[in-house]
Image (cartoon, grey):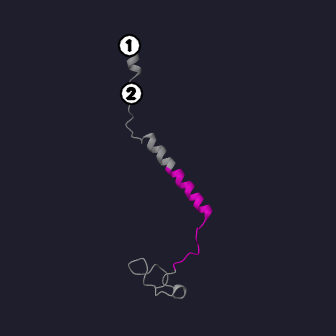
Amino acid sequence: MADEQQSAVQAPASTGRWGPPPALTGFVVLLLAMFALAYGVGSAAGPVAPGMRSTVGDAGSSGRSGTGGGTMGGHLGGDR
């Protein structure tokens, strides 16, 4: 009787194929679902500030010469 119980407890035979752990698969599925949800919400909301432009370098707006920008070249964008 003890021999019959031991044979039922044996590990399943390996098929030789590797598969990702279920936790990794679940995490990847959750990550993709969250990305899809965030993309859908962002698409529905549209652009946050479609008309926003940099005012650094515009001669008529602030009276500066445009040399005090935040990048190495002194310009943040726009006309050079």
Q: Pinpoint residue 24: horizontal percent, then vertical percent.
A: 44, 44
Q: Secondary structure at mark 1?
A: helix
Is residue 55 or residue 11 the one in the foreground? Answer: 55
**Residue 62 marker:** none
In this view, 54 is above or below 26: below
Mark 1 belongs to which amino acid?
A: Ala
Other-residue count near label 2 (Cα within 10 Å), few / some / many at <14 / 14–19 / ≥20: few
Q: Are marks 2 and 1 in contact (CB under 8 Å)?
A: no
Magenta part mainly helix, strand or loop? helix
> In terms of image quadrants, where is residue 22?
top left
Q: Is residue 45 magenta?
A: yes
Which comes before the other along the chain, label 2 or label 1?
1
Mark 2 belongs to which amino acid?
A: Ala
Span of residues in magenta: 31-54
Q: Which residue is mark 2?
A: 11
Q: Pinpoint residue 50: horizontal percent, then vertical percent.
A: 58, 72
Other-residue count near label 1 (Cα within 10 Å), few / some / many at <14 / 14–19 / ≥20: few
Is residue 64 or residue 29 the one in the foreground? Answer: 64
Residue furthest to the front in view is 63
Q: Residue at x 45, y 41 (%)?
A: 23
Is residue 80 or residue 69 the one in the foreground? Answer: 69
Q: Which residue is mark 1?
A: 2
Q: Pinpoint residue 69: horizontal percent, then vertical percent.
A: 43, 80
In this view, 20 is above or below 45: above
Q: Secondary structure at mark 2?
A: loop
Q: Residue at x 54, y 77 (%)?
A: 53
Is residue 12 or residue 58 the one in the foreground? Answer: 58
Q: State the separation of the CA atoms marked 2 and 1.
A: 17 Å
Where is the N terminus found, in terms of image quarters? top left
Q: Pinpoint residue 47: horizontal percent, then vertical percent.
A: 59, 68
